[in-house]
Amino acid sequence: MDNAQTTKVERNFVGLSPIDYRGKPSTLCPGCGHNTVSNQIQQAVYELGIVPEMIAKFSGIGCSSKSLNYYLSRSFGFNGLHGRMPTLVSGACFADRRIKALGTSGDGDTASIGLGHFKHLIRRNVPMVYIIENNGVYGLTKGQFSATSDLGLELKHQGKNFLPPLDLCMEALISGAKFVARAFSGDIKQMKELLKAAIAHNGIAVIDVISPCVTFNNHDDALQSYTWGRENEAPIQDITYVPRAQAIEIKEFQEGETREVRLHDGSSIILKKIDRDYDPTDKHAALDLLTESYKNHYFATGLIYIENASTNFFDEFDFVEEPLNRLTPDRLRPEPAALDRINQTYQ
Amino acid sequence: MDHPNENAQTGQKPLVNDFCMTICTVNGSGSATANTILYRALFNMGIPTSGKNIFPSNIKGLPTWFVIRASEKGYLGRVPYDDIIVAMNADTFANDLTYLPKGGVVFYADHLQKPADANPDLVYYPMPIRQMVRQAEVPRNLREYMENMAYVGIVGQILGIPMENIEYALRKHFGSRQTALESNRSMIQSGYEWASANVIKQDRYSVRVLPPLADYILTDGNNAGALGALFGGAQFCSWYPITPASSLVESMIAQNPKLRKDPQTGKNTCIILQVEDELAAAGSAIGAGWAGLRAMTATSGPGLSLMTENVGLAYYTETPVVIWDVQRVGPSTGLPTRTAQSDLAMVYRLGHGDINHIILIPGSVNECFEFGWKAFDIAEHYQTPVFVMSDLDLGMNQWITRKFDYPHEPMDRGRVLWEDDLARFEGAWGRYKDIEGDGIPWRTVMGNQNPAAPYFTRGTGHDEYGNYSEDPQNWAKTIQRIKRKLESSCEYLPCPIIRKKPNARIGIIALGSTDPAIIEGQDQLEEAGLPVDYLRIRALPVCCDVREFLENHEKVYVLELNRDGQLYGILIQELHDYSPKLISISEVDGLPMTAIWVKQQILSKEQQNG
């Protein structure tokens, strides 16, 4: 029975329903942290009222990279090579600068095989959101250590990990990222707000999401497990993203307890103090927080660092504003006279 | 060594506009400008000339040779001997003399020690260049450089290059830099005047002015490739520095602001991006090609090795991208500053799994320009990587070449669907669906706002709609369709060039920069009584012209600059019916092919086989 006419369908301000933001059914393991991230990505884009065609999705190889297919079917997507996602974006982004790129990666993709590209992508400040679904283990190849596996972690067929983990927020920070956040698959509200802010940020925004692997690395004492995360997560602030159109609501937040970080597009991030004074615009504080967090097994989540920037990668190239991929041949091929001049020069 | 200018017939008679001159210097001493001026002055006199820089993988201090060949008959290939040397390097002086025939000429800086056992049958011109530079009161930091200008004057005067042609070359080189122009000119004039007052010409080599080479220009293949790309509407080039490909992109960087400002907004329309490695260079170009830009990268063998996985991705996702391979000698780091045709077999099947590629192979600087723009049309038409295989000899050396022809045919952007185009298919469009029956699907690109346009691109097995698929029939069908698509490309690609000789029953097949050596060798074989036809392959996969050539000849020699006969290997695989007719002749030592080698190899094989 068709009851579509009687049921009120929820719509965002561009007239689309959440269904328009869905992807294919996930084939990841039930309970996988990555599915939560997929859901929050589509929810964030829906709530921001961005038409899905204005997003392009990119990924490498791994469980996280597969998840690209499980959200935003109405966005172009490119599931490329292991670790090389940043390279695809660095070329594709020039084709139509209106499109926001969303990169989804994992700890194998980003911290091992693609670490160089990750850091250079940040160095370039390509305007995009870079999400790492970090579970400290290789899932698709069935349970090997990754470069973010905790020191001393024991896995079924691997023995004990004797190498210290890389902290991808730290890597992002020292590579010059101006938006660095850490989220947890068990904290969806915070994740969604961080995603919205990241999408609004002008430049690269890195979100390291601790996203448990329920199959290979979910022992209660494992750093990237649900249990450990739930017991130890310590949000550094309560975060709310406020779109430009609703900026007026900021007044509702009481002064003193909150601080506002205004983004270049006029939207704002409202950060509410929880139990410590933390200034996310202070890079030294961010580095200290991450150092302390690792040392004391203190699972700090939230907006770790933000530096509002008026320029990004594109500004260095002074190229056409309209989509480059729509330029007609007459604007791409120089006139015959230009070749005549060249022929003359070389005579 | 057999020297063609040393036999009984030619004896000691004067030789006009026909010599090979090698300037033997130390790299980093600033001789490049001097050599270019000499070379350009000869070109300006209307003499067909080629200039080859034989240089080390080093910045300063090692020997380097600049070889100028002048040939009134228009032969531009390398010759394995000299007629004249300009000796400026003490370390190589004795050995450099061994390349000269009886009556050969030695200009040498008189502060170099002439070897005690120097061949008495040569003509020696000591040049007091240090003294001249000292007298000219050149600033200390420019003295070494100016010594080079002194020999330009002396050599120019003794060979008979008119000062006006040198003046032309100077103006071309220095343009509006008046001070540099004057100081260089002054040094050249000192050399010129010193020679006319103090030297009595004793050798038999000279030059004379010919009608101008009006249809010709002077440049290198990398610059031509760069210009070709810019006239081809390149919109994105990502790259990582590597010899001998760097100068291709550097030429693009230099020309881009002059050529590629949008006529409507004055903004740039071509992005050039140096990235962190060749993996990123390939990946970024593929990302751009996927998103609908005319995208390219340029590299050499080691870079291609790194790009391999990406190339497979582009092939299977059917993403257009142009990749230049300016070949050097490998494997490994190999000889970075020497030339070869050793990447062919690798490039033809670059990537793991079932794969093959379209390759364009320019044989002249002019073709580097032509294939520079054409490669984009082919890549977008067939939605696949297209390789342009040049080499160090073609790419980095100076050549006279026919003027560049403007690409008048319309750009072929391939099957791209925009918002309104999708309606035509009434929902039946799929990214990899063979709607037209020729194996080439329709594609949409990022930014298309039609909700039906986006699709999911993946390097994993996929069906006609881009959905993940491990279905055996689907895999076989897709990989066969891609094969069919590429095979059908051969008649669209640049066809071979055939140079015939009367009554030839045998043939030569070759490719790329060996063209001048083969043409000259072909003429020498004819003089020796062996007429041979010559087919130059300009693209792979091969077209039916090659089959016909094999059909029409009793046997065909495949000549190439690599160890194992890589083109030969491809031909016997692709045209196996003709394999009994094919004979491989191949060799690689890092230097360009010579006509003498072509002639000797074919004659000796003919004698062996009767």
Image: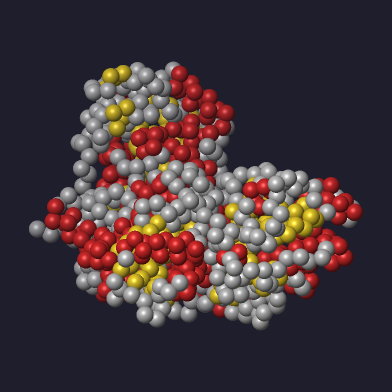
Question: B433 or B150, which is in the foreground?
Answer: B150
Viewed as shown, does residue B50 lie left or right of A244?
A: right
- In the rendered image, the quadrant that contains the N terminus of chain A is bottom left
Question: B448 or B54, which is in the foreground?
Answer: B54
Question: How far across and down, in percent of the image, does residue B407 sit?
Answer: 48, 76
Question: How far across and down, in percent of the image, does residue A267 sit?
Answer: 49, 48
Q: Residue at x 67, y 47 (%)?
A: B94
Viewed as shown, does residue A288 lie left or right of B62?
A: left
Give the colour scheme shown: secondary structure
Question: A51 or B580, which is in the foreground?
Answer: B580
- In the rendered image, the quadrant that contains the C terminus of chain A is bottom right
Viewed as shown, does residue B440 lie left or right of B187?
A: left
Residue A289 can be seen in this image: yes
Say how many tags the image has: 0
Question: How far across and down, in percent of the image, does residue B237 sit?
Answer: 49, 58
Residue B252 can be seen in this image: no
Question: How far across and down, in percent of the image, does residue A37 sit?
Answer: 32, 40
B568 up-or-down from A328: above or below? above
Q: Residue at x 40, y 56 (%)?
A: B586
Residue farthest to the front? B8
- Kindly indicate the quadrant of the structure image that contains residue B197: bottom right
Viewed as shown, does residue B454 lie left or right of A327?
A: left
Q: Residue at x 42, y 50 (%)?
A: B304
Q: Residue at x 40, y 69 (%)?
A: B536
